[in-house]
Image: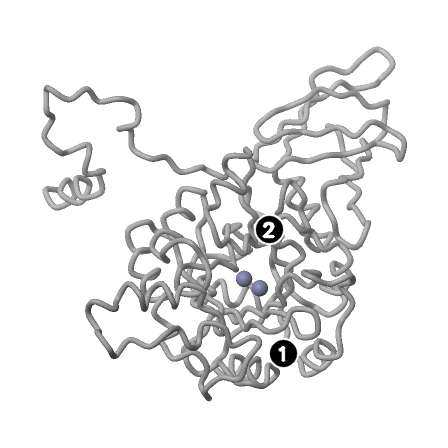
Amino acid sequence: MKKFIFSLLALLPISAIAQYNPETLRTPVAQPAQRIEIVLPQVCGYNLYKADLHTHSVYSDGDVTPAFRVREAYFDGLDVIAITEHLEYRRHEGNMLKFLKGYTGNKVKKAENYNLINKQCPKGGIQSDQNYAVEEAVKASKRYGILVIPGAEITREPVAIGHYNALFTKDNNTIYDPDPLQSLRNAREQGALIQHNHPGWRRTTCAKTEFEVKAYNEGLIDGIEVANGGSLYTTVINRAFDENLFVAANTDIHDGTAEGYRFKGQLRNMTLILAKECTLDALYEALCAKRTIAVSGGYITAKEELLKELFLASVECTVISTNSNGSRTFSLANKSSLPYTFKTSPNALPITLYPMQSLTLSVAKDKTYDMTITNMFCGENVNPVINLEVK
Ligand SMILES: [Zn+2]
Ligand SMILES: [Zn+2]
């Protein structure tokens, strides 16, 4: 018991146990920071783990450290974060070298391999330990109960080639090859899964390029971002399901998620992974089985079966009264942190059932309440239809 109490104390924020100075007025700012609790139901017997499968830190071109990424993910309500630095791009290299000059003297060279995307580079790519950011994140993750998926972004010219995240990598230092297709193969050889990132970025179409046709035909692509930051690529949803890819909605965050999401009252983009437990093995299995739901800015993308299950598991229907003509008045209570927008006919007013709120509706005798859920997509411009039994 003593040990138990000690461990509890160890979890308390330092401010709570530090000696109180009576001359110091403690303002509300001294309150411990608080995590957003995102409430989601089980779907098809699986837990929904909230993941971001695409993030950057100062070790490529992000603004913060990997440890900060982990802390931020914790406060944003996530369970899982992938650390996916660009393998070919290191924006801060020049500054880091300048900073170290006092220690390394004349040995300091100017930044040499900060951008391999547009120039020839030494074999092996950027000269540094590309696993370091992941290691730093893993170390930090122990304090927050967040799971870190090791990864890296294979980053090439965006229009013809594109960007690809290798997830569950074993050694980021052996992925780079001047030939991007060979880089994908190198990642695959170590058991990594490959996600096609932001397929419409800097392009006028999401249609496959010649390079992508080769990569897809070789079976090197396991998943695709239907959402990246504020972009929703609706035209790739059909491809995802026709070609058996997992769908992802990620932040690709470089600055802070507070600016892009929290300050706007938005949840950050999330790839919900349906798994039995939050371990690397279980999440890997779930992604191989393509069990994901992509959530971005209130839009929810997944296979039809998963979307219907998610809606029915989130929304509780209760009959309040049966009227003399047999019609029923009922409430729909949304017990989840996701919004659901629906229409009862093509020209009807869309109704949004907000997170943790309920509304009252009515339905004629012996009829189901038929809803098209317009913020859910199971194909390009395809929304699931729920024929709700009201009883
Ligand atoms: Zn990218
Ligand atoms: Zn990226």
In this view, 273 is above or below 223:
above
Query: What type is the residue that disc 2 sits on?
Result: Gly
Tell me where residue 94 sits by quadrant.
bottom left
Residue 175 - label:
none
In this view, 64 is above or below 13:
below
Q: Which residue is mark 2?
A: 229
Query: What type is the residue that disc 1 sits on?
Result: Leu
Which residue extends farthest top?
Answer: 324
- Rendering coords of residue 214 (x, y %): 71, 82
Q: Quadrant of the image for the N terminus?
A: top left
- Rendering coords of residue 129 (x, y %): 35, 75
Residue 220 - label:
1
Cα distance in 3D space between marks 2 and 1: 24 Å
| Residue 211 left/right relative to 350 | left
Residue drawn 55% across and 52% down? Answer: 251
Estimate how packed mark 1 is, as few (under 14), some (14 to 19) or many (20 or more) residues with alpha carbons within 10 Å.
many
Instruction: Return the residue nearer the eye: 260 or 317.
Output: 260
